[in-house]
Amino acid sequence: MTEPTSLPIVRLKPKAEARALRHGFPWVYADELVTDRRTQALPPGALAVLEDGERRVLGLVTVNTRSKIIARMLDRDPAAVIDQTWFEARLTRALALRARLFDAPFYRLVHAEPDGLPGVIIDRFGDVAVVQPNAAWAEAALTDLVAALVKVTGVATVIKNGSGRARGLEGLDEDMAVVHGVAPEGPLPVPMNGAVYMADLMGGQKTGLFFDQRPNHAFAARLAKGARVLDVFSHVGGFALAALAQGANHALAVDASAPALALAEAGARASGLADRFATRQGDAFAVLEALGADGAQFDLVICDPPAFAPAKPALEAGLRAYERLARLAAPLVAPGGYLVLCSCSHAADLQAFRNASARGIGRGGRRSQILHTGFAGPDHPVLPQLAESSYLKALTFRLDG
Protein backbone atom coordinates (compact mmCIF):
# COMPACT_ATOMS: atom_id res chain seq x y z
CA MET A 1 0.00 0.00 0.00
CA THR A 2 1.29 3.44 -0.92
CA GLU A 3 2.43 5.49 2.05
CA PRO A 4 0.36 8.67 2.54
CA THR A 5 3.40 10.95 2.27
CA SER A 6 4.19 9.63 -1.22
CA LEU A 7 0.71 10.11 -2.66
CA PRO A 8 0.30 12.44 -5.63
CA ILE A 9 -1.64 15.68 -5.23
CA VAL A 10 -4.61 16.59 -7.39
CA ARG A 11 -6.09 20.05 -7.31
CA LEU A 12 -9.44 21.68 -8.00
CA LYS A 13 -9.57 24.38 -10.63
CA PRO A 14 -9.52 27.91 -9.16
CA LYS A 15 -13.21 28.51 -9.88
CA ALA A 16 -14.39 25.08 -8.70
CA GLU A 17 -16.62 25.17 -5.63
CA ALA A 18 -14.84 23.42 -2.74
CA ARG A 19 -17.54 24.23 -0.17
CA ALA A 20 -19.77 21.33 -1.20
CA LEU A 21 -16.88 18.89 -0.76
CA ARG A 22 -16.13 20.29 2.69
CA HIS A 23 -19.79 19.83 3.62
CA GLY A 24 -19.90 16.18 2.58
CA PHE A 25 -20.44 15.99 -1.19
CA PRO A 26 -18.36 12.96 -2.22
CA TRP A 27 -17.58 13.53 -5.91
CA VAL A 28 -15.40 15.72 -8.11
CA TYR A 29 -16.46 15.97 -11.75
CA ALA A 30 -13.96 15.95 -14.59
CA ASP A 31 -14.46 19.63 -15.43
CA GLU A 32 -13.67 20.66 -11.84
CA LEU A 33 -10.18 19.15 -11.58
CA VAL A 34 -6.86 20.29 -13.00
CA THR A 35 -5.94 17.46 -15.37
CA ASP A 36 -2.29 18.03 -16.18
CA ARG A 37 -0.04 15.31 -17.55
CA ARG A 38 0.76 13.96 -14.09
CA THR A 39 -2.92 13.58 -13.24
CA GLN A 40 -3.70 12.04 -16.62
CA ALA A 41 -0.93 9.51 -16.03
CA LEU A 42 -2.50 8.19 -12.82
CA PRO A 43 -3.86 4.65 -13.25
CA PRO A 44 -7.63 4.20 -12.73
CA GLY A 45 -8.35 3.88 -9.02
CA ALA A 46 -5.13 5.56 -7.89
CA LEU A 47 -5.12 7.32 -4.52
CA ALA A 48 -4.29 11.01 -4.25
CA VAL A 49 -4.57 13.94 -1.88
CA LEU A 50 -7.16 16.46 -3.04
CA GLU A 51 -6.51 20.18 -2.57
CA ASP A 52 -8.72 23.15 -3.35
CA GLY A 53 -7.65 25.90 -5.74
CA GLU A 54 -5.74 27.60 -2.92
CA ARG A 55 -3.81 24.41 -2.04
CA ARG A 56 -5.77 23.64 1.13
CA VAL A 57 -6.15 19.93 1.74
CA LEU A 58 -9.66 18.49 1.41
CA GLY A 59 -8.98 14.79 1.94
CA LEU A 60 -7.93 11.50 0.41
CA VAL A 61 -9.53 10.66 -2.93
CA THR A 62 -9.42 7.99 -5.56
CA VAL A 63 -8.90 9.18 -9.13
CA ASN A 64 -10.13 7.79 -12.43
CA THR A 65 -9.49 10.07 -15.40
CA ARG A 66 -11.63 7.78 -17.60
CA SER A 67 -14.75 8.63 -15.63
CA LYS A 68 -16.93 11.75 -15.56
CA ILE A 69 -16.65 11.37 -11.77
CA ILE A 70 -12.91 11.91 -11.83
CA ALA A 71 -12.38 11.77 -8.05
CA ARG A 72 -14.29 10.22 -5.15
CA MET A 73 -13.71 11.15 -1.53
CA LEU A 74 -12.54 8.16 0.52
CA ASP A 75 -11.44 9.77 3.77
CA ARG A 76 -11.28 13.28 5.18
CA ASP A 77 -7.93 12.33 6.68
CA PRO A 78 -5.34 12.67 3.90
CA ALA A 79 -3.02 10.37 5.84
CA ALA A 80 -5.51 7.49 5.96
CA VAL A 81 -4.20 4.15 4.75
CA ILE A 82 -6.69 2.23 2.61
CA ASP A 83 -6.00 -1.33 3.70
CA GLN A 84 -7.87 -4.25 5.23
CA THR A 85 -8.07 -2.51 8.61
CA TRP A 86 -9.64 0.56 7.00
CA PHE A 87 -12.24 -1.62 5.28
CA GLU A 88 -12.95 -3.46 8.52
CA ALA A 89 -13.85 -0.20 10.26
CA ARG A 90 -16.27 0.79 7.49
CA LEU A 91 -17.85 -2.66 7.33
CA THR A 92 -18.21 -2.94 11.11
CA ARG A 93 -20.16 0.32 11.17
CA ALA A 94 -22.38 -0.83 8.29
CA LEU A 95 -23.02 -4.21 9.91
CA ALA A 96 -24.01 -2.63 13.24
CA LEU A 97 -26.84 -0.75 11.52
CA ARG A 98 -28.17 -3.79 9.66
CA ALA A 99 -27.93 -6.04 12.73
CA ARG A 100 -30.12 -3.55 14.58
CA LEU A 101 -32.64 -3.32 11.74
CA PHE A 102 -33.07 -6.98 10.79
CA ASP A 103 -33.51 -10.25 12.63
CA ALA A 104 -31.99 -12.34 9.85
CA PRO A 105 -28.85 -11.67 7.74
CA PHE A 106 -30.60 -10.85 4.46
CA TYR A 107 -30.07 -7.22 3.51
CA ARG A 108 -27.95 -4.67 1.70
CA LEU A 109 -24.83 -4.46 3.84
CA VAL A 110 -23.11 -1.64 1.98
CA HIS A 111 -24.87 1.02 -0.09
CA ALA A 112 -21.91 2.78 -1.68
CA GLU A 113 -21.30 6.44 -0.76
CA PRO A 114 -23.78 6.63 2.16
CA ASP A 115 -21.85 3.80 3.85
CA GLY A 116 -18.47 5.40 3.18
CA LEU A 117 -17.44 3.03 0.37
CA PRO A 118 -17.91 4.93 -2.92
CA GLY A 119 -19.12 2.78 -5.78
CA VAL A 120 -19.31 -0.40 -3.68
CA ILE A 121 -22.50 -2.43 -3.27
CA ILE A 122 -22.63 -5.48 -0.98
CA ASP A 123 -25.78 -7.55 -0.53
CA ARG A 124 -25.88 -10.32 2.06
CA PHE A 125 -27.78 -13.57 1.69
CA GLY A 126 -27.11 -15.44 4.91
CA ASP A 127 -23.64 -16.96 4.63
CA VAL A 128 -23.12 -15.58 1.12
CA ALA A 129 -22.23 -12.00 0.17
CA VAL A 130 -22.36 -10.52 -3.32
CA VAL A 131 -20.00 -7.61 -3.98
CA GLN A 132 -20.36 -5.14 -6.84
CA PRO A 133 -17.12 -3.14 -7.16
CA ASN A 134 -18.51 -0.47 -9.46
CA ALA A 135 -15.58 1.94 -9.16
CA ALA A 136 -11.98 1.45 -10.29
CA TRP A 137 -10.53 1.94 -6.80
CA ALA A 138 -12.73 -0.84 -5.39
CA GLU A 139 -11.69 -3.19 -8.18
CA ALA A 140 -8.03 -2.48 -7.36
CA ALA A 141 -8.61 -2.97 -3.61
CA LEU A 142 -10.86 -6.02 -3.92
CA THR A 143 -8.49 -8.39 -2.08
CA ASP A 144 -8.44 -6.23 1.06
CA LEU A 145 -12.18 -5.58 0.80
CA VAL A 146 -13.03 -9.28 0.59
CA ALA A 147 -10.68 -10.21 3.44
CA ALA A 148 -12.28 -7.55 5.63
CA LEU A 149 -15.78 -8.66 4.63
CA VAL A 150 -15.09 -12.26 5.61
CA LYS A 151 -13.52 -11.23 8.91
CA VAL A 152 -16.28 -8.81 9.93
CA THR A 153 -19.33 -10.82 8.85
CA GLY A 154 -18.11 -14.42 8.90
CA VAL A 155 -19.68 -15.18 5.51
CA ALA A 156 -18.50 -18.42 3.92
CA THR A 157 -18.78 -17.31 0.29
CA VAL A 158 -18.14 -14.01 -1.49
CA ILE A 159 -19.22 -13.53 -5.10
CA LYS A 160 -17.94 -10.70 -7.24
CA ASN A 161 -20.67 -9.44 -9.57
CA GLY A 162 -18.83 -7.22 -12.00
CA SER A 163 -21.71 -6.43 -14.34
CA GLY A 164 -23.84 -3.41 -15.06
CA ARG A 165 -23.82 0.08 -16.51
CA ALA A 166 -21.86 1.66 -13.65
CA ARG A 167 -18.75 -0.41 -14.34
CA GLY A 168 -18.80 0.57 -17.99
CA LEU A 169 -18.80 4.23 -17.02
CA GLU A 170 -15.64 3.55 -14.99
CA GLY A 171 -13.93 1.77 -17.88
CA LEU A 172 -14.15 -1.61 -16.13
CA ASP A 173 -14.79 -4.96 -17.79
CA GLU A 174 -17.70 -7.19 -16.84
CA ASP A 175 -16.70 -10.13 -14.68
CA MET A 176 -18.51 -12.68 -12.49
CA ALA A 177 -16.45 -14.81 -10.11
CA VAL A 178 -16.42 -16.53 -6.73
CA VAL A 179 -13.60 -14.75 -4.89
CA HIS A 180 -13.97 -16.60 -1.56
CA GLY A 181 -15.46 -19.97 -0.69
CA VAL A 182 -17.64 -22.10 -2.94
CA ALA A 183 -20.40 -21.02 -5.30
CA PRO A 184 -23.98 -21.82 -4.23
CA GLU A 185 -25.35 -24.95 -5.89
CA GLY A 186 -28.49 -23.13 -6.97
CA PRO A 187 -30.82 -20.26 -6.10
CA LEU A 188 -30.92 -19.42 -2.39
CA PRO A 189 -34.15 -19.02 -0.40
CA VAL A 190 -34.60 -15.56 1.12
CA PRO A 191 -37.34 -15.03 3.74
CA MET A 192 -38.96 -11.61 3.49
CA ASN A 193 -42.37 -10.18 4.38
CA GLY A 194 -43.83 -13.60 5.15
CA ALA A 195 -42.85 -15.12 1.80
CA VAL A 196 -39.81 -16.96 0.49
CA TYR A 197 -37.97 -15.55 -2.53
CA MET A 198 -35.46 -17.46 -4.62
CA ALA A 199 -32.29 -15.49 -5.43
CA ASP A 200 -30.01 -16.58 -8.24
CA LEU A 201 -26.75 -15.03 -7.10
CA MET A 202 -24.67 -16.18 -10.06
CA GLY A 203 -27.05 -15.54 -12.94
CA GLY A 204 -29.79 -13.18 -11.79
CA GLN A 205 -30.22 -9.44 -12.24
CA LYS A 206 -27.91 -7.21 -10.19
CA THR A 207 -27.02 -9.16 -7.02
CA GLY A 208 -29.95 -11.58 -7.40
CA LEU A 209 -32.69 -9.83 -5.41
CA PHE A 210 -33.90 -6.28 -4.82
CA PHE A 211 -33.88 -5.65 -1.08
CA ASP A 212 -34.69 -1.96 -1.55
CA GLN A 213 -38.40 -2.59 -2.14
CA ARG A 214 -38.91 -4.57 1.08
CA PRO A 215 -40.93 -1.86 2.93
CA ASN A 216 -42.94 -1.08 -0.19
CA HIS A 217 -43.78 -4.76 -0.65
CA ALA A 218 -44.99 -4.72 2.95
CA PHE A 219 -47.17 -1.63 2.52
CA ALA A 220 -48.80 -2.92 -0.67
CA ALA A 221 -49.42 -6.28 1.02
CA ARG A 222 -51.50 -4.49 3.68
CA LEU A 223 -53.97 -3.67 0.89
CA ALA A 224 -54.02 -7.18 -0.54
CA LYS A 225 -56.23 -9.28 1.75
CA GLY A 226 -58.87 -10.94 -0.40
CA ALA A 227 -57.60 -9.10 -3.48
CA ARG A 228 -56.89 -9.99 -7.08
CA VAL A 229 -53.32 -8.77 -7.64
CA LEU A 230 -51.41 -7.89 -10.81
CA ASP A 231 -47.62 -7.48 -10.40
CA VAL A 232 -46.03 -6.03 -13.57
CA PHE A 233 -42.23 -6.12 -13.99
CA SER A 234 -42.40 -8.64 -11.16
CA HIS A 235 -38.82 -9.98 -11.43
CA VAL A 236 -38.79 -12.87 -8.91
CA GLY A 237 -42.27 -12.06 -7.59
CA GLY A 238 -41.50 -9.24 -5.17
CA PHE A 239 -44.91 -7.61 -4.71
CA ALA A 240 -46.98 -10.63 -5.73
CA LEU A 241 -45.56 -13.09 -3.20
CA ALA A 242 -45.74 -10.57 -0.35
CA ALA A 243 -49.39 -9.90 -1.25
CA LEU A 244 -50.23 -13.60 -1.29
CA ALA A 245 -48.51 -14.08 2.07
CA GLN A 246 -50.87 -11.45 3.49
CA GLY A 247 -54.02 -13.08 2.15
CA ALA A 248 -54.50 -12.07 -1.47
CA ASN A 249 -56.88 -14.39 -3.30
CA HIS A 250 -54.75 -14.59 -6.43
CA ALA A 251 -51.72 -12.93 -7.99
CA LEU A 252 -50.55 -12.72 -11.59
CA ALA A 253 -46.86 -11.89 -12.12
CA VAL A 254 -45.79 -10.39 -15.45
CA ASP A 255 -42.20 -10.13 -16.64
CA ALA A 256 -40.25 -10.35 -19.88
CA SER A 257 -37.71 -12.73 -18.33
CA ALA A 258 -38.55 -16.43 -18.29
CA PRO A 259 -35.76 -17.21 -15.78
CA ALA A 260 -37.09 -14.52 -13.40
CA LEU A 261 -40.61 -15.94 -13.61
CA ALA A 262 -39.27 -19.45 -12.99
CA LEU A 263 -37.67 -18.15 -9.80
CA ALA A 264 -40.96 -16.49 -8.86
CA GLU A 265 -42.77 -19.79 -9.34
CA ALA A 266 -40.14 -21.55 -7.21
CA GLY A 267 -40.63 -18.91 -4.53
CA ALA A 268 -44.38 -19.44 -4.61
CA ARG A 269 -43.89 -23.18 -4.12
CA ALA A 270 -41.41 -22.61 -1.29
CA SER A 271 -43.91 -20.25 0.35
CA GLY A 272 -46.82 -22.67 -0.01
CA LEU A 273 -48.61 -20.17 -2.26
CA ALA A 274 -48.37 -21.82 -5.68
CA ASP A 275 -52.10 -22.61 -5.95
CA ARG A 276 -52.91 -18.88 -5.95
CA PHE A 277 -50.04 -17.72 -8.15
CA ALA A 278 -49.72 -17.48 -11.93
CA THR A 279 -47.18 -15.96 -14.32
CA ARG A 280 -47.32 -14.44 -17.77
CA GLN A 281 -44.20 -13.81 -19.81
CA GLY A 282 -44.14 -10.89 -22.22
CA ASP A 283 -43.44 -7.23 -22.82
CA ALA A 284 -45.11 -5.37 -19.96
CA PHE A 285 -46.72 -2.69 -22.13
CA ALA A 286 -48.08 -5.30 -24.56
CA VAL A 287 -49.47 -7.41 -21.71
CA LEU A 288 -51.14 -4.37 -20.13
CA GLU A 289 -52.74 -3.50 -23.46
CA ALA A 290 -53.94 -7.09 -23.91
CA LEU A 291 -55.39 -7.24 -20.40
CA GLY A 292 -57.17 -3.94 -21.02
CA ALA A 293 -58.64 -5.25 -24.28
CA ASP A 294 -59.91 -8.30 -22.39
CA GLY A 295 -61.57 -6.11 -19.76
CA ALA A 296 -59.48 -7.62 -16.94
CA GLN A 297 -59.90 -6.14 -13.47
CA PHE A 298 -57.69 -6.33 -10.38
CA ASP A 299 -58.06 -4.94 -6.89
CA LEU A 300 -54.35 -4.15 -6.61
CA VAL A 301 -52.02 -3.40 -9.53
CA ILE A 302 -48.29 -2.80 -9.10
CA CYS A 303 -45.86 -1.61 -11.78
CA ASP A 304 -42.19 -1.71 -10.76
CA PRO A 305 -40.23 -1.14 -13.99
CA PRO A 306 -36.48 -0.82 -14.51
CA ALA A 307 -35.06 2.68 -14.69
CA PHE A 308 -36.70 4.47 -17.62
CA ALA A 309 -34.55 7.56 -16.90
CA PRO A 310 -31.14 6.28 -15.72
CA ALA A 311 -29.52 9.64 -16.51
CA LYS A 312 -30.59 13.20 -17.33
CA PRO A 313 -30.40 12.81 -21.14
CA ALA A 314 -33.09 10.11 -20.88
CA LEU A 315 -35.36 12.09 -18.54
CA GLU A 316 -38.01 13.30 -20.98
CA ALA A 317 -38.37 9.92 -22.68
CA GLY A 318 -38.40 8.23 -19.28
CA LEU A 319 -41.20 10.44 -17.95
CA ARG A 320 -43.25 9.70 -21.07
CA ALA A 321 -42.76 5.98 -20.42
CA TYR A 322 -43.91 6.34 -16.78
CA GLU A 323 -46.96 8.28 -17.96
CA ARG A 324 -47.81 5.61 -20.53
CA LEU A 325 -47.42 2.89 -17.95
CA ALA A 326 -49.84 4.64 -15.59
CA ARG A 327 -52.30 5.23 -18.45
CA LEU A 328 -52.35 1.53 -19.36
CA ALA A 329 -52.47 0.28 -15.77
CA ALA A 330 -55.20 2.58 -14.42
CA PRO A 331 -58.13 1.03 -16.34
CA LEU A 332 -57.21 -2.41 -14.96
CA VAL A 333 -57.83 -1.29 -11.36
CA ALA A 334 -61.30 -2.16 -10.07
CA PRO A 335 -63.39 0.70 -8.63
CA GLY A 336 -61.99 1.62 -5.23
CA GLY A 337 -58.86 -0.43 -5.89
CA TYR A 338 -55.20 0.46 -5.59
CA LEU A 339 -52.39 1.23 -8.03
CA VAL A 340 -48.73 1.20 -6.96
CA LEU A 341 -46.31 2.88 -9.36
CA CYS A 342 -42.56 2.72 -8.80
CA SER A 343 -39.49 4.42 -10.22
CA CYS A 344 -35.84 3.62 -9.56
CA SER A 345 -34.63 6.46 -11.82
CA HIS A 346 -32.64 9.00 -9.82
CA ALA A 347 -32.81 11.42 -12.76
CA ALA A 348 -36.59 11.57 -12.32
CA ASP A 349 -37.16 13.21 -8.94
CA LEU A 350 -40.24 12.59 -6.84
CA GLN A 351 -42.22 15.56 -8.13
CA ALA A 352 -41.55 14.77 -11.79
CA PHE A 353 -42.44 11.10 -11.31
CA ARG A 354 -45.56 11.92 -9.32
CA ASN A 355 -46.73 14.38 -11.99
CA ALA A 356 -46.12 11.90 -14.82
CA SER A 357 -47.98 9.18 -12.91
CA ALA A 358 -50.94 11.45 -12.16
CA ARG A 359 -51.15 12.53 -15.81
CA GLY A 360 -51.15 8.92 -16.92
CA ILE A 361 -53.89 7.96 -14.47
CA GLY A 362 -55.98 10.89 -15.68
CA ARG A 363 -55.41 9.96 -19.31
CA GLY A 364 -56.52 6.45 -18.38
CA GLY A 365 -59.88 7.91 -17.44
CA ARG A 366 -59.50 7.62 -13.67
CA ARG A 367 -59.37 9.96 -10.70
CA SER A 368 -57.02 9.18 -7.82
CA GLN A 369 -55.73 10.07 -4.40
CA ILE A 370 -52.23 9.32 -3.12
CA LEU A 371 -52.24 7.21 0.03
CA HIS A 372 -48.56 6.62 0.56
CA THR A 373 -45.15 7.56 -0.77
CA GLY A 374 -42.48 4.94 -0.19
CA PHE A 375 -38.73 4.95 -0.63
CA ALA A 376 -35.90 2.43 -0.36
CA GLY A 377 -35.57 0.57 2.92
CA PRO A 378 -33.22 1.70 5.70
CA ASP A 379 -30.52 -0.72 4.56
CA HIS A 380 -30.25 1.68 1.58
CA PRO A 381 -29.38 4.89 3.47
CA VAL A 382 -29.28 8.24 1.72
CA LEU A 383 -26.34 10.62 1.78
CA PRO A 384 -28.03 14.02 2.24
CA GLN A 385 -25.52 15.79 0.01
CA LEU A 386 -25.92 13.27 -2.84
CA ALA A 387 -29.30 13.34 -4.55
CA GLU A 388 -28.37 10.28 -6.60
CA SER A 389 -28.43 8.13 -3.45
CA SER A 390 -32.19 8.79 -3.12
CA TYR A 391 -33.45 7.01 -6.21
CA LEU A 392 -36.44 4.78 -5.38
CA LYS A 393 -40.00 6.11 -5.27
CA ALA A 394 -43.18 4.04 -4.76
CA LEU A 395 -46.51 5.86 -5.03
CA THR A 396 -49.68 4.14 -3.84
CA PHE A 397 -52.89 5.53 -5.37
CA ARG A 398 -56.51 4.71 -4.59
CA LEU A 399 -58.62 5.05 -7.70
CA ASP A 400 -62.17 6.29 -7.92
CA GLY A 401 -65.03 3.97 -7.07
Image: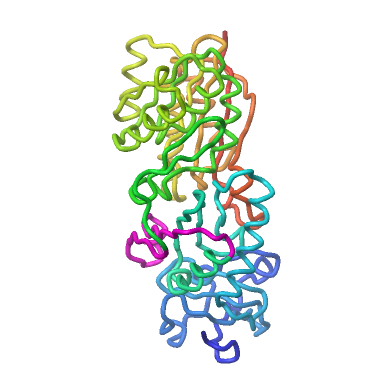
Q: Residue at x 36, y 46 (%)?
A: 204
Q: Residue at x 52, y 43 (%)?
A: 211
Residue 308: x and y in percent read 42, 41
Please tell me which residue lies in front, 398 or 218: 218
Q: Is residue 200 visible?
A: yes
Residue 171: x and y in percent read 36, 67
* Above or below for 47 versus 238: below
- Quadrant assignment, res 157: bottom left
* Above or below for 355 versus 381: above
Residue 265: x and y in percent read 37, 29
Q: How is the image coloured?
A: rainbow
Residue 33: x and y in percent read 53, 76
Residue 170 is one of the magenta-drawn residues: yes
* Above or below for 111 versus 260: below
Residue 104 is one of the magenta-drawn residues: no
Q: Quadrant of the C terminus?
A: top right
* Above or below for 350 versus 229: below
Q: Residue at x 63, y 73 (%)?
A: 75
Please tell me which residue lies in front, 180 or 374: 180
In the picture as drawn, the residue positioned furthest to the bottom comes out as: 6
Please tell me which residue lies in front, 312 or 83: 83
Query: Which residues fall within the magenta stretch?
Result: 152-180
Q: Is residue 365 visible?
A: no
Left or right: 213, with 263 as reference point: right
Q: Residue at x 39, y 57 (%)?
A: 161
